[in-house]
Amino acid sequence: MTDLADLYQQVILDHNRNPRNFGPLAGATCQAQGHNPLCGDRVTVFARVSGPTIEEVAFQGSGCAISKAAASMMTTLVKGRSVAEVEALATRFHSMVTSDPNVPVEAADLGKLAAFAGVRAFPTRVKCATLPWHALRAVIRGAGEPVSTE
Ligand code: ZN
């Protein structure tokens, strides 16, 4: 799994340097904030949900490279997918990052998310990786509620 360690470096650093879908989302139908006090990460996730589909998603916030890269990659993976698919993906991701670090990750199953397997060896960083997913779950569970103007 040495190659996976390399992938972790490249993909995460790239998403941290050039976060995708970063900034407020015009026409967002819902949003939620997440805070990881252990690390100081803060993230706000915006989404435009239409029926069962997440049409657009974006995020804003500040935090460590892991949290920012996790949020960035998440937005690229969930756009255009159904709420049910995204719930399943969030569950899959959470169980991967909290799994035994000595057990190889099924990279084929997880796709790009396997890049975050490295956090398993650093329990304090697991919350950095899962924070944006927690926020996204809050967003889609509150889908339909108007975005606060404050
Ligand atoms: Zn963090």
Image (cartoon, rainbow, N blue to C red):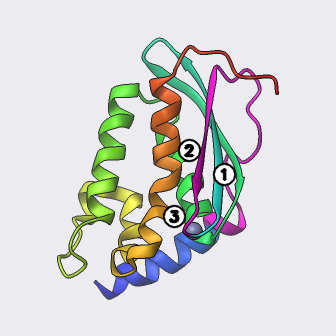
Q: Secondary structure at mark 1?
A: loop
Q: Secondary structure at mark 3?
A: helix
Q: Residue at x 36, y 83 (%)?
A: 3
Is residue 3 a member of the stretch shown in magenta?
A: no
- In the rendered structure, which segment of residues is drawn in magenta? 15-38
Q: Quadrant of the C terminus?
A: top right
Is residue 36 a member of the stretch shown in magenta?
A: yes
Q: Residue at x 38, y 75 (%)?
A: 123
Labelled disc at residue 20: 1
How far apart in space, not on screen, are marks 3 and 1 (Cα)? 17 Å
Residue sitting nearer the eye, 44 or 88: 44
Q: Position of residue 88 (x, y in %)?
A: 29, 38
First along the sequence among labels 3 and 2: 2
| Residue type for callout 3 | Cys
Residue annotated with mark 3:
128
Q: Position of residue 80 (x, y in %)?
A: 49, 29
How many C-alpha atoms fall within 10 Å of the one at disc 3: few (<14), some, or many (≥20)? many
Residue annotated with mark 2:
75
Left or right? Give the position of 103 relative to 120. left
Q: Position of residue 138 (x, y in %)?
A: 49, 34
How far apart in space, not on screen, are marks 3 and 2 (Cα)? 15 Å
| Residue type for callout 1 | Arg
First along the sequence among labels 1 and 2: 1
Q: Secondary structure at mark 2?
A: helix
Residue sitting nearer the eye, 34 or 53: 34
List the single residue furthest toward the left. 103
Mark 3 Cβ inside 8 Å of ligand 1: yes
Left or right? Give the position of 110 relative to 50. left
In this view, the mark in front (3 or 1): 3
Q: From the viewer's perspective, is residue 69 above or below residue 122?
A: above
How many C-alpha atoms fall within 10 Å of the one at disc 1: few (<14), some, or many (≥20)? some
